[in-house]
């Protein structure tokens, strides 16, 4: 394999500018989409939850220790587990928070 190809592949790995750019964009879009979805699905008058904060926490939890490649394949179960951890941390005692999911 030519050296230039090896260098190009290395540049796209964990910690690369591409990886970091992808993660930044992923987090922004994740929080934006999550907040919109949660706000529209919430019962009328629901003001006890700061959805942007909850979605930011969830994004951080799902991103923790994952590469851009892993984030592209993120499962619903991983997202639900992260959301449960964040609910338990931000809103102790609220239904949907499962502290055991840590």
Image (cartoon, helix red, strand yellow):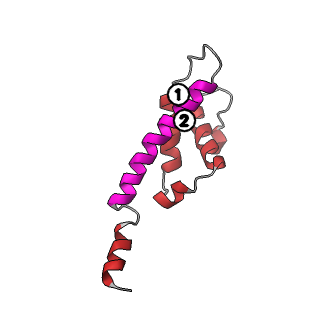
In x, y percent, where is residue 75?
Answer: 63, 51
Residue at point 34% right, 72% down? 8
Within the image, what quadrant is residue 2 found in? Answer: bottom left
Kindly identify which numbered label has been placed on residue 22: none
* Prevailing SS of the magenta stretch: helix
| The residue positioned farthest toward the right in the image shown | 95
The answer, for residue 48, to whether it is visible in the render is yes
Query: Magenta span has 38?
Result: yes
In x, y percent, where is residue 80?
Answer: 64, 42
Residue at point 36% right, 53% down? 21
Specify few, some or many for label 1: CA neighbours under 10 Å numbering under 14, 14-19, or 20 or more: some
Of mark 1 and mark 2, the one earlier in the sequence is 2
Residue at point 32% right, 59% down? 17
The number of discs equals 2
- Label 1's element? helix
Kindly identify which numbered label has been placed on residue 51: 1
The answer, for residue 67, to whether it is visible in the render is no
Q: Is residue 49 left or right of residue 23?
A: right
Residue with the mark numbered 2: 34
Q: Quadrant of the N terminus?
A: bottom left
Gap between marks 1 and 2 measured at Cα: 8 Å
| Tag 1 near tag 2, CB within 8 Å | yes
Within the image, what quadrant is residue 99 found in? Answer: top right
In x, y percent, where is residue 41?
Answer: 63, 26
Q: Quadrant of the C terminus?
A: top right
Q: Which residues are magenta?
A: 17-41
């Amino acid at each position: 394999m030519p050296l230039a190809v090896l260098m190009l592949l290395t540049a796209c790995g964990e910690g690369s500018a591409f990886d970091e750019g992808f993660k930044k964009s992923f987090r922004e879009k994740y929080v934006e989409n999550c907040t919109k979805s949660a706000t529209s699905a919430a019962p009328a008058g629901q003001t006890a939850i700061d959805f942007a904060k909850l979605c930011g926490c969830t994004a951080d939890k799902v991103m923790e220790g994952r590469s851009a490649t892993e984030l592209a394949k993120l499962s619903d179960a991983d997202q639900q587990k992260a959301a449960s951890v964040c609910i338990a941390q931000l809103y102790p005692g609220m239904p949907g928070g499962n502290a055991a999911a840590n």
